[in-house]
Amino acid sequence: MRYSPISRFRGTLIGAFLGESLATGNIQSQSYLDLGRMTVLGTESLIALGRLDLEDWIARQQQESLHLAVTDDVSIKIILATLPVTLFFHENPIKLRHNLLHVLKIWEDDPIVRDVTLAVGYAISLALTEKLNPLILIPQTISFLQETPTSIPKKLLTVQNLLEQGAGLSRAQAEFAKEEKLTNTIAMAFYCFLSTLEDFRLALLRATDNGNFMQQAIGAITGALSGAYNGIGGIPVNWQVLLLQKNSPAWGLTNFSQMLKLANAFVAVWSGVYDLTLNPRELTEEGYEVALLSVYAAPRVIRSR
């Protein structure tokens, strides 16, 4: 395996955070905090329950007053709020699709938001399982979307043509930046990601070329895609250090370090690691503490879910 799951999980979450914050130029903006808080709440729900529970998601969002109706300016928040579901079910495409569609029921049913969520989720799942082939990613993604009335497949095919022709950033921007629509946003994000596949820094700088809402959305999606593919190690160290030094609230958390701990806990729950500190009663038997045992298994005996 090229990168560990924890590196890719961290890369996905922190990549989305950096992409959105670079576009806004202010990591404490209200839009940024709302977007990240929805993502964090979903992650915390999956950690606490070990499964997807819509009632728990809704309760957590209502407690934070984050229940949103679908409009152009909040669609990106909804899409990135589903990132925890993508990470949690990434190894099984059938479960991934089912659970992404399931969690979208929290909000109004918008076909464009649905297709963008599925496209981003599927691309990330391929990156996490190291099955992402840039030459066939777009055809595979269109197939994953299945039959749809939206223009997302057409936009993605345009991206494929631009990449095959070696088109530069200015040409892609001219093609997709005419209107600040979510269909153009996903197209530009896929272009920035695939045209600079191995370079997280360059992908985000190209995605956040301007400071409008479209660039904010493009940056967040590009950051998630590139972060999943390149892992935390692909994110420039000086960017990570800057966030640690600022000690600013990250997505509603106390600080950036807490985000890293949240990602670690998320990977542990996903992988099936049993946290004994959360279940102290399991350590006692007839009033006596039971010694902790080390468990071993032959190679390939313990498998993923």
Image (cartoon, grey):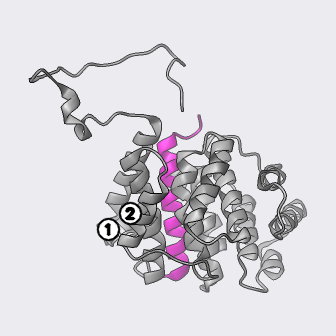
Near mark 2 (Cα within 10 A), the count class, few <14, some 14-19 or many ≥20, is few
Task: Write the residue at 82% across / 82% down.
Answer: 174
**Which residue occupies the foreground of this view, 277 or 2?**
277
Q: Is residue 39 magenta?
A: no
Image side of residue 29 versus residue 145, left or right = left
Image side of residue 69 versus residue 197, left or right = left
Vertical position of residue 105 compared to residue 35: above or below: above
- Please state which amino acid type lies under the numbered disc 1: Gln
Q: Position of residue 240 (x, y in %)?
A: 42, 62
Region rendered in magenta: 1-25
- In which quadrant of the rendered image does the N terminus lie? top right
Task: Write the residue at 48% across / 60% down.
Answer: 14
Work out which residue is located at the far top of the displayed protein and give it: 298
Magenta region, mostly helix, strand or loop? helix
Q: Secondary structure at mark 2?
A: helix
Residue 201 visible somewhere in the drawing: no
Image side of residue 92 versus residue 166, left or right = left
**Which residue occupies the foreground of this view, 241 or 150?**
150
Work out which residue is located at the far front of the displayed protein and give it: 55
Q: Position of residue 245 (x, y in %)?
A: 32, 68
- In which quadrant of the rendered image does the C terminus lie? top right
Near mark 1 (Cα within 10 A), the count class, few <14, some 14-19 or many ≥20, is few
Q: Is residue 6 magenta?
A: yes
**Spatial CA span between label 1 and label 2:** 6 Å
- Please state which amino acid type lies under the numbered disc 2: Val
Task: Write the residue at 53% across / 25% down.
Answer: 303
Q: Position of residue 255 (x, y in %)?
A: 31, 66
Name the residue that disc number 1 marks.
245
Name the residue that disc number 2 marks.
241
**Which residue occupies the foreground of this view, 1 or 44?**
44
Q: Secondary structure at mark 1?
A: helix
Q: Are marks 1 and 2 in contact (CB under 8 Å)?
A: yes
